[in-house]
Image (spheres, rainbow, N blue to C red):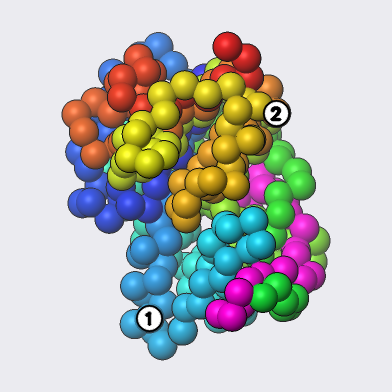
Amino acid sequence: MIVVKIGGSILSDSLHTSIFDDLVALLHNEKIIIVHGGGKQVTSVANRLGVKQQFIVSPGGIKSRYTDRDTVEAYTMVMSGQVNKSIVTKLLKQGINAVGIAGIDGGLLRAERKKKLLIINDKGRKMSIDGGYTGKINHVNNSLIDVLLDKDFVPVISPIALGEEFEYLNVDGDRAAAHIAGNMRADRVIFLTDVAGLLIDGRLIENLTLDEAKMMLPKIGFGMEKKILACTEALELGVGEAIVGNGSRENPISKLLAHENCTVIKAHE
């Protein structure tokens, strides 16, 4: 089984057709679960709706969207509506039995709402702010995914989680993919993005162990740091290997599975 996370940067590239051609071939031999991003699309629609978007940085250097009440409504609308159904439509066109669901459906993703967020302000100082509608995943209920896979459907999941008070919560798509992969005992989790993989000083890091990846996290810049963090979480949850690579090339998933020009992280060498 493979979990594929399609990043928003790839989705904004006219839903790169080769990804879907690749999936057709892979589905003959593999069960596949898709988790998607779509942050750029959320920002675009939110701005058009007059919902101002704010981005924050944690002391660990992780950049994320600040999610107030208006933003979580826009986020849910765009991710579970426009973006999710665009992917489903593309898959159906390729003859793939895709079903779009949100993390709230069937209680798939449950999360604890963050009460406070520690951030670095514009002056470089730490400060605490209200947590808004951001969540940390604490439970995955795979029952709905199991039903869909048993009937040969391909689940396409938007990363909206259900909070303890049944509110919508924004959870990171990469980490959602990691948790789903771990809970489903996936062999691999693949993160499709718009670069070759983890680049340090312009050099592609092709292979890392789990321990090496965790040690490198403080040195990784915005964007990629979440993917590498998600890789480490997936491995700690029992996934065989985590792969990060470019989704904007021909047959990207097959090439990543073959470890061509990408970053591969395993628990051990």
Name the residue type under label 2.
Answer: Leu
Relative image position of residue 210 (x, y in whole percent)? 62, 26
Residue 14 seen? yes
Residue hosting label 2: 237
Total residue callouts: 2
Q: With respect to residue 15, does 260 lie above or below?
A: above
Label 1 sits on what residue type?
A: Asn
Q: Earlier in the sequence, mark 1 or mark 2?
A: 1
The 10 Å Cα crowd at callout 1, few under 14, some 14 to 19, many 20 or more, is: few
Look at the image and tell me whether residue 152 can be seen: no
Q: Decide: is 24 above or below 41.
A: above
Q: Residues within 10 Å of mark 2 (few under 14, many from 20)?
A: some
Find numbered disc 2 in the image and state the secondary structure of the residue it sits on. loop
Q: Quadrant of residue 111?
A: bottom right
For label 1, the residue is: 47
Say above or below: 230 vs 222.
above
Query: At x 36% / y 64%, what residue is drawn?
Result: 41
Relative side of 92 to 179, left or right: left
In the displayed structure, does residue 187 sit left or right of residue 224? right
Across and down, in percent, residue 14 comes to 21, 51
Q: Which residues are magenta?
A: 99-124
**Quadrant (top left, top right, bottom left, bottom right) of the C terminus:** top right
**In the rendering, at what x and y percent does residue 53 appear?**
47, 78
Residue at 36% over, 27% down: 262
| Residue shown at the point (54%, 39%) measured from the top left | 228
Q: Residue at x 31, y 20 (%)?
A: 260
Q: Is residue 61 left or right of residue 128?
A: left
